[in-house]
Image (cartoon, rainbow, N blue to C red):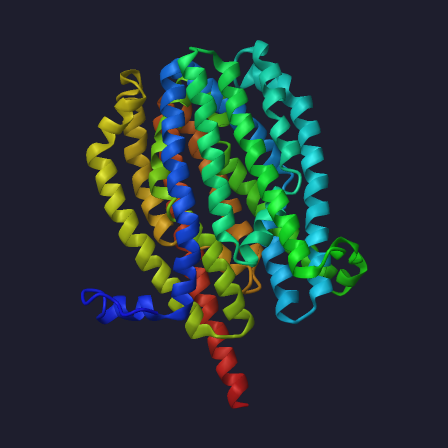
């Protein structure tokens, strides 16, 4: 590595920036960060244009339509990105490349089946979503229309996981930026033409399709590069010896994903059912702005997971703890600084979407800042327990937290609307983040002690 500037060449920053593990995490996160940051900026412009074109209530209705399809898709999903990273990585580390190819093939087939099921469910449930969530039966066709994005995402999660494992973060970043730019172009055209809700739905649908197809094609090319043109002929019978653990991993991550879905990713639907599209519009703006805090940290999750999974497999416990400390330092400094900026200037940012979003959207944003700052700092709180052999523990913790959050939603949302939802989410982040981080550190300590005892014996 080149010589560091003098102000960085000392103390903890020197150690942090010179460590090869941290360098890899920061490099790969940098690719994803650049893609996600540009995408977030373009996404904010997209939502500002959409909000100004549609108004609060129709903007909330847009959120209900798009989230409905995403929620149903995630409901059947097994988070195959993490699954692919874990098992393709495991077999690749052992030099069993045909097994690794079979693992990717199995993940893609499982995801394809779940995606087709999700699309069928969207079509079947669209009339109910329009009636009870959007409070407008006439919008059922828009729910079905946006559901087409699920078919484009047939194996997108598995594909993204494969690209991450083989260090193709730059490719993912480029695809993310291109997708956001094209979506913005379509929304901009709708804004200039003063089009309606259907045009905006089509623009978002187009962006989703572009991303999914590009990621899938890139992953198929990468698979051929790594395993040869006939990689897809690797028999699934090669995985028989690991079938039980693979199934256990997939079911556990699906259950955790489902619980997260109920408690966090489906909030717009809860708001639509218990309140109104108007409150959805306020909350959607608050969540769009809070993404300025969330999105830059999200790349650390996948890049840290990749490195930590390798170090855990090699039983390098000091390296694991170092990665977690370094990651928390980086994300914590950014999160606290950004949260303070949003607290002071949030009203002006909300005003960009339209003065009718004030003050409700700002109050929701202010409430979310506390929980998001904490969970950002402890961003690794769930993922590290997977390679540590505790995939069920996050599920159990999330289940308890989900029940508490649902109770809060039922009590607070009918009277407080968007602000009630913000309170429930912030509490959920604080509770689950703290408990899972504590369990992770406890497990790491026990594993390190067991390794020392084995070495001495």
Picture coordinates of residue 116, whole percent (x, y): 71, 34
Is 330 located above or below residue 194 in the figure? below
Q: Could you say which quadrant of the image residue 187 lies in?
A: top left
Relative to 203, say whether 21 is above or below: below
69 or 27, which is in the foreground?
A: 27
Locate residue 239 relative to residue 418 in the image: left or right.
right
Most foreground residue, 351 or 447: 351
Does residue 215 appear to the left or right of 431 in the view shown? right
Q: Quadrant of the C terminus?
A: bottom right
- Which residue occupies the extreme bottom position in the image? 457
In the rendered image, residue 2, in percent from the top left (x then y), is placed at: 31, 69
Q: Is residue 332 above or below residue 114?
A: below
Q: Residue at x 34, y 39 (%)?
A: 292
Left or right of 15? Residue 450 is right
| Residue 79 visible to the viewer | no
Viewer-proximal residue among 51 and 245: 51
Number of numbered discs on residues: 0
Residue 94 lies in what quarter of the image?
Answer: bottom right
Residue displayed at 39% across by 25% down: 47
Is 281 or 14 nearer to us in this picture?
Answer: 14
Residue visible at 40% across and 36% down? 424
The percent coordinates of residue 448 (x first, y second) are 47, 76
Q: Which quarter of the rendering shows the N terminus?
A: bottom left
Displayed quadrant of residue 57: top left
- The answer to whether 204 is drawn above or below residue 290 in the figure is above
- Image coordinates of residue 126 in percent, x first then y, are 63, 20
Q: Is residue 41 visible?
A: yes
């Amino acid at each position: 590595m080149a010589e560091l500037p003098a102000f960085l060449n000392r103390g903890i920053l020197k150690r942090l920036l010179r460590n090869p593990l941290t360098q890899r995490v920061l490099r790969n996160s940098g690719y994803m960060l650049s893609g996600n940051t540009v995408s977030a900026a373009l996404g904010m412009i997209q939502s500002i244009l959409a909000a100004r074109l549609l108004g609060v209530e129709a903007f909330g209705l847009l959120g209900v339509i798009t989230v409905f399809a995403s929620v149903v898709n995630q409901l059947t999903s097994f988070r195959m990105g993490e699954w692919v990273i874990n098992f393709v990585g495991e077999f690749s580390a052992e030099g069993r490349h045909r097994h690794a190819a079979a693992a990717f093939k199995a993940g893609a087939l499982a995801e394809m089946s779940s995606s087709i099921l999700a699309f069928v469910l969207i079509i079947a449930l669209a009339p109910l979503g329009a009636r009870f969530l959007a409070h407008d039966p006439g919008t059922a066709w828009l729910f079905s229309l946006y559901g087409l994005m699920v078919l484009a995402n047939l194996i997108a999660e598995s594909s993204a996981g494969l690209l991450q494992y083989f260090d193709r973060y730059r490719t993912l970043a480029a695809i993310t930026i291109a997708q956001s730019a094209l979506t913005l172009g379509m929304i901009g055209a709708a804004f200039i033409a003063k089009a309606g809700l259907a045009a905006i739905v089509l623009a978002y649908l187009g962006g989703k399709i572009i991303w999914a197809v590009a990621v899938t094609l890139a992953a198929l090319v990468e698979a051929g590069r790594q395993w040869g043109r006939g990689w897809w002929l690797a028999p699934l019978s090669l995985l028989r010896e690991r079938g039980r653990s693979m199934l256990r991993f997939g079911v556990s991550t699906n259950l955790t994903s489902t619980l997260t879905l109920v408690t966090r990713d489906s909030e717009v639907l809860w708001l639509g059912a218990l309140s109104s599209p108007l409150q959805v519009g306020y909350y959607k703006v608050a969540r769009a702005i809070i993404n300025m805090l969330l999105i830059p940290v999200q790349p650390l999750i996948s890049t840290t997971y990749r490195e930590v999974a390798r170090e855990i497999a090699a039983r390098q416990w000091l390296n694991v703890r170092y990665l977690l400390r370094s990651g928390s330092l980086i994300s914590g400094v950014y999160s606290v600084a950004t949260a303070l900026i949003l607290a002071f200037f949030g009203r002006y940012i909300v005003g960009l979407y339209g003065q009718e979003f004030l003050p409700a959207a700002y109050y929701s944003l202010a409430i979310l800042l506390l929980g998001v700052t904490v969970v950002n700092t402890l961003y690794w709180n769930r993922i590290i327990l997977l390679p540590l052999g505790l995939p069920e523990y996050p599920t159990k913790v999330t289940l308890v937290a989900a029940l508490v959050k649902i109770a809060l939603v039922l009590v607070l949302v009918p009277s407080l609307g968007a602000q009630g939802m913000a309170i429930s989410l912030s509490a959920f982040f604080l509770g689950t983040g703290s408990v899972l981080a504590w369990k992770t550190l406890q497990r790491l300590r026990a594993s390190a002690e067991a390794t020392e005892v084995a070495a001495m014996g």
